[in-house]
Amino acid sequence: MELNKYPKWFILVRITRFLITKFIPHRLLYRVNARADTLMLSMSTKKRHGVWTLYCINAKQSDEFFSMCESALTLLFHSDPRRYQRMRSLIRNIVLTPLGQDCFDHISWSILINNYDPARPDLLAITFVHESTHAYLRSKGLCHNDNPRRHEEICLKEEFRSIKRIMTASSAFTEDQRIEALQQWQDYFKAAMESEWWKPEKRDLVIADALRNLHKRID
Ligand SMILES: [Zn+2]
């Protein structure tokens, strides 16, 4: 999904927020970020689904995104009720917004989705599992910045447990296909945990890059 498909107001909100946070005292950051989030959500297309409010900043894409969220949540409900329940008790909003990566926002208890594959509700369900695990850790008073690598490891392991459940619940796989697919997922997780990306200083670079790209597209 290209950033230039997004409405101009959204790009303006992102850039204004970025510029303001560069120049204000640290103690005001929380308030400014919360205000920018509120503004962004109030201008988005929204839909209520169960306990969640789904937001899409691009009205033209909202039907597709909302139906993807509903399919992913239904999949979790049937194949992994415990993690579905975690989503239900901790997450208030699911928001499609291009930040360069998916993330959990503890100010509004939201999952922010960067992008999704319209043909793969299972991948969106796994993203929900990852981000709601961040919410769970936060609800226990554990702050991501204190030990990012450990937090990401826990979230990845939760993803893998959920993938196993989703694949076991699906009758679309033979036993051999299931074993092969799980082996591929396991390799993916091992590689992810060993990659440079998981080092905290690299995470900061990813966010800085996302913001720089935001500027480039506007010029
Ligand atoms: Zn994470």
Image: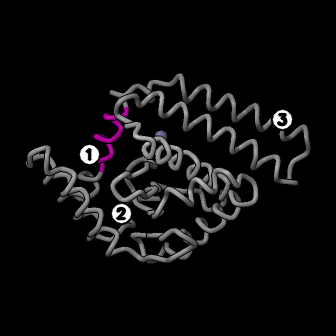
**Residue stretch rendered in magenta on the structure:** 203-213
Q: Residue at x 62, y 26 (%)?
A: 190
Q: Amino acid at mark 3?
A: Ile
Task: Give the distance between the C-alpha atoms of the residues marked 3 and 2, in whole angstroms.
Answer: 41 Å
Q: Please name whichever residue, 51 or 99, is drawn nearer the observer in this view of the structure.
A: 51
Q: Are marks 2 and 1 in contact (CB under 8 Å)?
A: no
The quarter of the picture where the C terminus appears is bottom left
Q: Secondary structure at mark 1?
A: helix
Q: Residue 179's mark?
A: 3
Residue depth check, mark 1 versus mark 3: number of the one nearer the observer? 3
For the stretch drawn in magenta, what is the main secondary structure? helix
Is 57 magenta? The answer is: no
Residue at figure coordinates x 23%, y 52% from the top left: 215
Residue behind mark 2: 4
- Identified by mark 2, the residue type is Asn
Residue 46, above or below 92: below
Q: Amino acid at mark 1?
A: Arg
* Tags 3 and 2 touching, CB below 8 Å: no
Q: Bin the neighbour count of mark 2 within 10 Å (Cα to Cα): few under 14, some 14-19, many 20 and up.
A: few
Which mark is drawn over residue 181? none
